[in-house]
C-alpha cells in the first residue's frame, strides 16, 4: 500500500522527470490503501531498483495517471532521474506469487504490479494493476502479472506468463511500455530490459545492497495569488520543482554514530585552490542518499563541515577513516558502477540505503593523524589508483598522478554566530516580549529536511514595514499551534502546522500583520510564523488533510508574491481578546480545526463556529514596526 509518508509526497504534487500540473485524477486514499497493499512477507530479488531499456532509459510511472485507486497506470520510458517513480521491486515469492521461476514486477512507489491484459485495446494492454488482479486488492495470484525470471539483472526479455511464451514487453513509438509478438530465445533491442541497482559499492563481504536509491521530486503550486491593488483581481499561479525528504526514512538512513572516535569534527575540506567541499541535503533522494558533493567558495556553513571517523559502527579497519557530512551524517562513497562523473556521492554509512549496513570499503580512506596537517589525497579503498578531484565544481574521480589538484587540506571550521542561528530551548510557557525575531534558517543534522540558506533567505524576507501583534495561538483544549522549520521543503515552504503542548518556544510564536507588503486589505490579517516568516496558507486544491500549510507570504514559492487571499483572515483588534475562528478569505464557510494534532480545515458556519473551530490568543503583545 501507499504508506502515509508516500501520501504526503503525493499530496505535495508528486512528479516524474517532467513537472506535473493540476490533474483530473483524484486519488481516493482509502480505496488506494486497500487496493495497493505492500507484501511485507515477500521474497525480493531486487528492491527499489531501476529497469532500463536497451537505449538506457528508465521505466517510470506517474501515480496520478491511472484511476482513483492507482490502477490502470501506464508505464513510460523516460530519461533516468533517480526518482521514486522509476523504482521497482522484483518479487519471486509471496502472497501474489506462488510459482517458482516467475516474478512479479512491482512499482516500489505505488506497490501495484506490472500487468498484461490482451483483452484491452491495442497500445493499452500493459499497465500497473493491483497485485493479484482484482481492482480492490482482494486478488491472490494472476498469471497476467507473472513474468519468467530465473535470476540475474539481464538484459532479459519480460515474458508475461499469460502470453504463452510468445509475447514480449517492448517500448513502442510513443515511449510507452507495450507488448509485441516475439520469440523469447531471440529477443533483442527494445524487447530487452536490465535491472540495475543504485546502492553503494563494495568489494568486501560487507557489500552494499541494491536497496532503494531514489529521489522524490514534487511539483508545488502556491495557492492562487490575488492582487487587491486598485480593486482589480489578478490570479497568478507559479509551479516550482522541489525535493521532498521523508524525515523518518532519512533519520533511519543517516543515523549519527555517537560511539565513534573522531579524528576531526566539523572541519572544512579544501581543494588546492582554497574552495570547500559542499553538501546540499535536498540534492539527493528522499533518504538523503545519492547526494553529489560540490565545490564552492568557503562560507563556514554546516553544509561544508565534515567529521573524520577512525573507529565506530561503520569503521573497524585500522589506519582508515570515514569522511562524514556533519550536516546529514551521510558518508563519502565511491561507486565505480555508476555513470562517469556520478561515482562520488554521499550515501548512508555502511553502504545500505536504509541505514542497516555495517562496513563497506567504498567509504573507507587510508588515514593517519598526520593527514590532518598536510595535503591529503582522497583515495577510496575500493578504488586502487583512484583519486578524487574537482571536476568543474563537483567532486569526481580520476586515475591518480602526482598532481596538486588531487590534494586536499583538512582545516578548522569557520562557522560564525551569524551563519547559523539555533532556536533557543524553551524554559517556561511564559512568552517574553522582545523586539527581535528568530532567524528563518534552522540547521539540524538529524532532521529529514534541511533548508537551503540562499533559497530560504530569499523566500522568507521579514517585512520591516508592518504593523503587527505577536502571540501564541492555542486551541480550545489549551494546546498551541507549532511550526517545525525543517518539516517543509528546502525553502521552508509547505510546512504543516502542528497542534502540540504549549512550551513557549519560537516555533509557537506568530505575528498578526494587519498592514504591510503582503496585506493591503482593511480588517484582515496575515498570520506569520515568527520563526520562519512564512504565512498561514489555505489551498483547497491540495489533498484533504494537507490544505493548511505555511507558505511564502504573497503566495509565490520564491518569495516574489504580493498579496493573496489564501493567506488573509478577517480580523479586528477585538479578536486578540476573545475566542477567534481562523476562516481564510479564499474559503467561504471554511474553519481551521485541530485534526489529530495537525491544523486542518472543515466546513463551518463562520458566523457561529463551534468550540473546536475556535482559536484564542494568550500572552500576546504588540510590536510596531514602521
Image (cartoon, grey):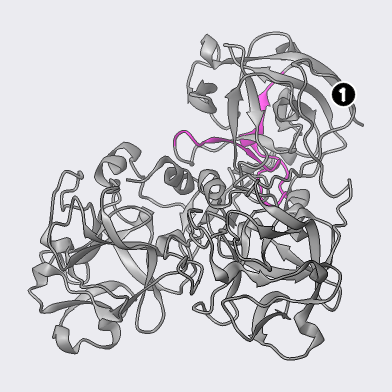
Residue 5 pos. (x, y %)? 45, 43
Q: Is residue 326 visible?
A: no
Q: Identify the residue at horizontal 88%, vertical 57% (top origin).
A: 414
Instruction: Describe the element under mark 1 as helix, strand or loop.
Output: strand
Position of residue 322 relative to residue 24, above or below, is below
Q: Is 619 in front, or is 535?
A: 619
User: What is the residue that sits farthest to the front in this orientation?
Assistant: 318
Residue 582 placement: quadrant: top right
Q: Identify the residue at horizontal 77%, vertical 90% (top origin).
A: 402
Position of residue 444 relative to residue 314, above or below, is above
Q: Residues within 10 Å of mark 1 (few under 14, many from 20)?
A: some
Q: Is-magenta flag for residue 20?
A: no
Tell me the quadrant of the picture where the C terminus can be found: top right
Locate residue 622 relative to residue 9 in the image: left or right.
Answer: right
Residue 130 pos. (x, y %)? 23, 52
Locate residue 52 relative to residue 535 in the image: left or right.
Answer: left
Residue 111 pos. (x, y %)? 31, 53
Q: What type of secondary structure mainly makes up the magenta span? A: loop
* Magenta segment boundaries in residue numbering: 544-571
Amino acid at each position: 500500500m501507499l504508506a502515509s509518508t508516500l501520501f504526503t509526497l503525493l499530496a505535495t504534487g508528486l512528479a516524474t522527470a517532467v513537472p506535473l500540473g493540476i490533474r483530473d485524477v483524484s486519488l481516493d486514499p482509502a480505496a488506494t490503501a486497500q487496493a495497493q497493499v505492500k507484501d511485507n512477507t515477500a521474497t525480493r530479488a531486487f528492491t527499489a531498483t531501476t529497469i532500463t531499456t536497451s537505449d538506457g532509459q528508465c521505466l517510470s510511472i506517474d501515480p496520478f495517471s491511472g484511476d482513483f485507486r492507482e490502477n490502470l497506470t501506464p508505464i513510460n520510458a523516460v530519461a533516468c532521474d533517480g526518482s521514486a517513480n522509476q523504482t521497482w521491486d522484483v518479487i519471486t515469492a509471496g502472497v501474489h506469487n506462488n510459482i517458482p521461476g516467475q516474478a512479479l514486477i512491482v512499482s516500489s512507489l505505488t506497490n501495484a504490479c506490472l500487468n498484461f491484459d490482451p483483452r484491452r485495446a491495442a497500445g493499452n494492454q500493459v499497465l500497473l494493476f493491483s497485485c493479484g488482479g482484482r481492482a480492490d486488492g482482494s486478488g491472490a495470484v494472476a498469471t497476467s502479472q507473472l513474468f519468467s525470471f530465473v535470476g540475474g539483472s539481464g538484459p532479459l526479455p519480460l515474458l508475461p506468463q499469460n502470453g504463452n511464451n510468445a509475447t514480449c514487453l517492448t517500448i513502442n513509438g510513443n515511449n510507452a511500455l507495450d507488448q509485441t509478438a516475439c520469440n523469447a530465445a531471440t529477443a533483442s533491442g527494445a524487447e530487452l530490459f536490465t535491472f540495475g541497482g543504485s546502492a553503494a559499492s563494495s568489494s568486501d563481504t560487507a557489500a552494499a545492497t541494491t536497496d532503494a536509491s531514489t529521489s522524490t521530486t514534487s511539483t508545488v503550486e502556491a495557492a492562487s495569488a490575488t492582487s487587491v491593488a486598485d480593486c482589480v483581481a489578478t490570479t497568478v499561479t507559479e509551479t516550482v520543482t522541489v525535493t521532498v525528504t521523508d524525515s523518518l526514512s532519512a533519520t533511519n538512513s543517516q543515523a549519527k554514530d555517537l560511539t565513534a572516535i573522531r579524528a576531526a569534527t566539523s572541519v572544512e575540506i579544501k581543494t588546492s585552490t582554497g574552495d570547500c567541499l559542499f553538501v546540499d541535503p535536498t540534492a539527493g533522494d528522499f533518504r538523503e542518499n545519492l547526494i553529489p558533493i560540490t565545490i564552492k567558495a568557503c562560507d563556514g556553513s554546516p553544509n561544508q563541515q565534515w567529521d573524520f571517523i577512525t573507529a565506530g559502527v561503520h569503521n573497524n579497519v585500522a589506519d582508515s577513516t570515514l569522511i562524514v557530512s556533519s550536516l546529514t551524517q551521510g558518508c563519502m562513497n565511491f561507486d565505480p558502477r555508476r555513470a562517469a562523473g556520478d561515482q562520488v556521492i554521499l550515501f548512508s554509512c555502511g553502504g545500505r540505503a536504509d541505514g542497516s549496513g555495517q562496513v563497506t570499503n567504498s567509504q573507507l580512506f587510508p588515514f593517519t593523524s598526520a593527514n590532518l596537517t598536510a595535503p591529503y589525497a582522497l583515495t577510496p579503498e575500493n578504488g586502487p589508483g583512484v583519486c578524487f578531484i574537482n571536476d568543474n565544481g563537483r567532486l569526481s574521480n580520476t586515475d591518480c598522478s602526482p598532481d596538486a589538484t588531487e590534494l586536499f587540506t583538512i582545516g578548522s571550521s569557520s562557522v560564525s554566530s551569524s551563519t547559523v542561528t539555533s532556536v533557543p530551548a524553551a524554559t517556561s510557557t511564559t512568552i517574553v516580549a522582545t523586539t527581535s525575531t528568530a532567524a528563518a534558517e534552522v540547521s539540524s543534522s538529524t532532521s529529514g529536511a534541511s533548508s537551503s540558506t540562499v533559497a530560504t533567505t530569499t523566500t522568507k524576507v521579514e517585512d520591516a514595514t508592518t504593523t503587527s501583534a505577536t502571540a501564541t495561538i492555542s486551541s480550545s483544549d489549551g494546546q498551541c499551534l507549532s511550526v517545525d522549520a525543517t518539516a517543509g521543503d528546502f525553502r521552508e515552504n509547505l510546512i504543516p502546522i502542528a497542534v502540540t503542548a504549549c512550551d513557549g518556544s519560537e516555533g509557537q510564536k506568530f505575528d498578526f500583520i494587519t498592514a504591510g507588503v503582503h496585506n493591503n486589505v482593511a480588517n484582515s490579517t496575515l498570520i506569520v510564523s515568527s520563526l520562519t516568516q512564512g504565512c498561514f496558507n489555505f489551498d483547497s486544491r491540495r489533498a484533504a488533510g494537507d490544505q493548511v500549510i505555511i507558505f511564502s507570504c504573497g503566495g509565490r514559492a520564491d518569495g516574489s508574491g504580493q498579496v493573496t487571499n489564501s493567506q488573509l483572515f478577517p480580523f479586528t483588534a477585538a479578536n486578540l481578546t476573545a475566542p477567534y475562528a481562523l476562516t481564510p478569505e479564499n474559503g467561504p464557510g471554511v474553519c481551521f480545526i485541530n485534526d489529530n494534532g495537525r491544523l486542518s480545515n472543515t466546513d463551518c458556519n463562520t458566523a457561529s463556529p463551534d468550540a473546536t473551530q475556535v482559536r484564542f490568543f494568550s500572552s500576546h503583545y504588540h510590536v510596531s514596526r514602521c
